[in-house]
Each structure stands twice: as C-alpha cells, then as structure tokens.
Image: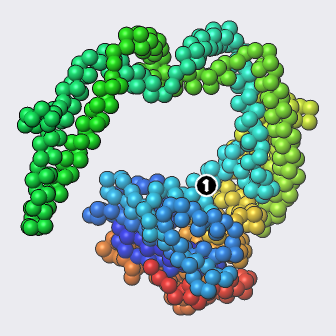
Amino acid sequence: MLEEIRISSLGVIQDAVLPLTPGLTVVTGETGAGKTMVVTGLSLLFGGRADPARVRTGATEASVDGRVLLERSRPRMAEVAARVADAGGAVEIEEPPGDGADVLLLRRIVNGNGRSRAYVGGAPAPASVLAELGESLLVMHGQSDQLRLTRPAEQRAVLDRFAGVELEEYAVAFTEWRDADRVLQERTSRAREMQREAELLAHGVAEIDAAELIPGEDVELNEAAKRLSHADALRLAALGAHTALRGGDESTGDAPTDVASLLDSVVRQLGAVVGADRELDELASRARDLSAVADDLAHELSAYVDRIDADPEQLAQIETRRAVIAALIRRYGDDLDAVLSWAEDARKQLTDLDVSDEAMAALAEKRDRSAQRAAKLAGTISTTRRVAAERLAAAVTDELHGLAMASAQLEITVQSRPAASSDLVLVVDGVGCAASIDGVDDVQILLRPHPDAPSVPLQRGASGGELSRVMLALEVCLAGADPVATMVFDEVDSGVGGRAAVEVGRRLARLARTHQVIVVTHLPQVAAFGQNHVVVDKAATESVTASDLRVVRGEDRVVELARMLGGRDTDAARIHATEMIAEADAESSPPPRRRKAAGQRRT
C-alpha cells in the first residue's frame, strides 16, 4: 500500500505531501484546486506518460516521490522485490522480518523539455519498470477507464480476472500451431522456388565441405608462400647474420671480428678484476648477459639456416590451395571465416527450405498436434468463461440494484467467434472458430436499464452515470480476485447523485476493507465514508503548497462536508454533514490495523 506521496511543481501544486492510510482515503476540494493533480502524480509515479505541459509555470521540472509498503502477506510482493533488485534498486527490509511490510521508495522527474527520469529503490531505471511495478501494486480508475470498459477486449479481460482464467499455456500452444501452420503453407505455396534455393545452397555447402577448410588456414598459407618464395634471400640473410655473430676463428691467429668473440673477450677482461669494485662487477654481469644472448641468437640463426630451403614443389602445392580458398572467398565471403559462417548459415536455411515429402508430413503432423492441444485448451477456457459469466452478471446485477438501479439487469455473453476465410480456425467441440491469442470467444457486456428496455452493449446504450456504477459494481465483485493492494478512483461518481451517491460511498468503503482505496470526489455522500479525509485548498497565489493540502478531522471535516453540500458554511449544512458522517461511520467496518512502525516513517 501507499504510505505517502510528495508532489512538487506539478500543475497548480507547488510542493505538497499527501499522507495515506489503510482503508478509504477521500480527496476533496474546490473545482480547479488541484485534486486531479493528485491522480496525475500517482499516474506519473507508476509509469504514466510524461507530459511537459504539466510542469508548473516557472519551474524547470516536476517530481513525484512515493513511499510504498510491501506487505509480505499480499500476493506478488516477492515478485515486486525481485523486479526492484533486477533494476538495480533495493527494498528497505523492516525488522523483524516476519509478516510485516518492507519499504520501497519510488521517484519520477519530468523536465520542461519532456524528458523524464525514474528511480526505483534508489537506483535510476526506465519508466517502464515503474509501470511494471504498478501492475502489481495498484489499479487506477477514471472516466477514461469507463470508456475503456466499452471495448470488447477489456470486457473479456474483466471476465477472465473474475474467472481466474490463465492464458499462458493456451498462448504457447496457439503460437506453436500458428507458426507451424504458417511454415507449412509457405512451403506448400513456394515449394518450387524453395527447391531451387535449396539446390543452390546445397551446392555451395558441398563445395565448401569438399575443400575441408580449417579456420585460420588462409593466414598460415600466406605466410608459408611468402617464406618459400623468398627462401634464398632469407637463407643468405640468416647466414650473414650468423657469421657476424659467430664467424671469427681464433686458431688462425687473427684478431676476432665477430660479435660473440668480442663479447667473450670483454667478459674475460672484466672477469680478471672481479671483486675489486662493485660498480665494475655490475657492468661485468651485464656483459655476461649480452654474451649469453648473442650466443643463443647465433644458435637459433644456425638452426634457421638449416631449416630454410627453396622447395618449388611445396610452393606449388601451397599456391594451388590458396587458389581454391580464394575462389571460395570470391563466391561466399570476404575472408575464410566469412566462408565458413556462410556454410553454417546455409545448413540452417536448408532445414527451413526442406520441401521433401518426409519434411512436409512431419510439419503437418506438428501443426495438427499443436492444433489439437490449442483447441482442447481453448474449449476449457470457453467453458470456464461461460460459467463465470453467469455468476459475475448475477453478482454485478445485485450490486447495481444497491446503486439505485433497482430494475437494471447486466448480462455477459460468451460466444464462439465465427470463422471467416482469412482467419486461423480451430475446431473446438466440433465447431470451427476463429482463434486468436486470447482464445476463440467474443465476450460482450450488455445492460438493460429497466424491464421495458432491450439489453444493449455498454458501448451503445449506457450513460456516463450508468458506466460509473457498472465499473464500481464490477470492482466490488472483482475485489477478491484482484491481488493489488491499492485502488485509485478519479471522480468515479461522475453523473451520480442522491441515494446512488450514498451507495457508491458504501461500496467504496466495502472495497476498503480489503484494499487501500483512494477516491477523488466532489460528492459529500461519498466523502462521508472516508476514514482519511484530505482537502486540497488553492491559495490566493494560485498554487498549492504543503500547508494547502490538509488532513481534516472532527469539526474541520464537518466544515468541508458542509461546503460540499451547499457551498456555504451554515448551521443547517453542518447539521446535515454531521448526520452523514454518523450514518457512514455506523455502516463502515473499522479499517485494517496499521503498523505503528510504518506510520512513523516519512520520506
């Protein structure tokens, strides 16, 4: 649940902190005071679109900070903590680590140029990570969500939430079937073209395989060819160098002229006075090292001279091999590695281009096997949806009766999607149905406002007030199936008044028994049910600061409800407001007990 959010330089809000509690929090205030910015701030905090127009005039950036309690007893909290860790952030572990709650800090910054930054658990992260976390932490409802409820895909998703339908296994089977069917059709329609392409690839692979290429072979051959073609010059150079190093003959009585002999003489002369002076001893040591290096170099040059020899026959063989490799490089790549890579890729392509009878039969078998599995799973999903549709429709109808729609009837139809020639068709229970990643069903929610009216789809016949009540009724019925801790409603009571408004407040209070519920409302009947009442005041400076966002209790709350009732603070309005609060308190259950330690912490 959310414990606190801080909003800075967002719209009319200059700097304000919104304290939140378990149960039902209502946010009220004059029109234009900044109530909507609270919802906008929550949307930003959980990955919503960064609109630079929302940055307060004169400010360079807007920011929203949130403190979230991850209650360990709720579903998905372990997954939330793991996702935070994957993003590089950290969750503050509360002590003792029993069944309490840990703390997650979130932050979103929007610059005036439209760019935004996000922070999760103290670490920078993409805004998409905030959105992912939001899916597990809260759900937001506003007038745009009412419009979304008119879409068939959203209506199917609502039913699936209630029914507990899991589409993952079916989606895997559907994807396998769709891909196998696509490959089979492609190979069937392009069999001749693919056969020609396969023949060309097979010819190239056979040519490369016949050459028995070795990685790096071209480099070694180039070096060998260069050495053999210059063998005489190399031998003469090495022999001359060896002579210069070890070419003298002291037996002739001539003074030695080679390097090695001269160094030997240096070592002998310095060795005669070894121990007489430390500095000269060090120079003698270096002379001995030089003599040893010269001697080693002379031996290696002698061995090289013995090895190097012009071999026209070997050179011819090397040049022939180089020609074979060069021809393959011209046809299949820029170098030998590229040729080998082309052959590897070609072998993989040949598998995809196999249009032999055996390969086509194997593909058809795979397609049919996947189709049978997908059809079986789709049938199970359809049955689950139909059973759940009756239960959900009956439950929502009961809720609507309590929301001052006493004669309304909600219906949810689940019908197999008729197949067309362009569709992917699964045979489910003997009937061909158009299949998609979400199954083979068309789900539609219909509303009959009163007995004399026909049942019509929500998108065609429901008013704004009716949509608000249908959405609220659905949320009440789905509360047990929804794992999120926090629900946010932005003027969900739009188009509602009178007794219906009281019933809206009552149902929001019922939701608040198992969820944290935050409601932005302009109706006193709804606000009376709040267990935490926040008032947004806009000061004369046309900005909302910390002092303008108040938690009201006692007489201050009565004054606020009186203002909402009639716009003026009169004795009659106060009496009415007091009665409304008393009635709401009598009907509401006490909120869940809040941990003292959590309530003492602030960002």
Residue 361: x and y, percent? Answer: 82, 20
Residue 235: x and y, percent? Answer: 26, 22
* Left or right placement of residue 68 versus residue 265 in this view: right
Residue found 44% across the figure and 69% down from its top = 122
Total number of numbered labels? 1
User: Given the image, on which type of amino acid does mark 1 rest?
Assistant: Asp
Say above or below: 266 vs 405. above
Say which of 384 and 503 sits in front.
384
| Label 1: few (<14), some (14–19) or many (≥20) C-alpha neighbours in 10 Å | some
Residue found 79% across the figure and 57% down from its top = 164
Q: Quadrant of residue 558?
A: bottom right
**Is residue 418 at least partly visible in the picture?**
no
* Left or right placement of residue 68 versus residue 443 in this view: left
Position of the N terminus, as image quadrant, is bottom right
Say above or below: 231 vs 594. above
Q: Which residue is mark 1?
A: 145
Residue 316: x and y, percent? Answer: 41, 10
* Left or right placement of residue 169 versus residue 154 in this view: right
Farthest residue in the right direction?
A: 430
Residue found 45% across the figure and 19% down from its top = 333
Residue found 72% across the figure and 36% down from its top = 175
Say which of 352 and 171 sits in front.
352
Say above or below: 48 vs 187. below
Position of the C terminus, as image quadrant, is bottom left
Q: How is the image coloured?
A: rainbow
Say which of 413 and 376 sits in front.
376
Residue 172: x and y, percent? Answer: 74, 42
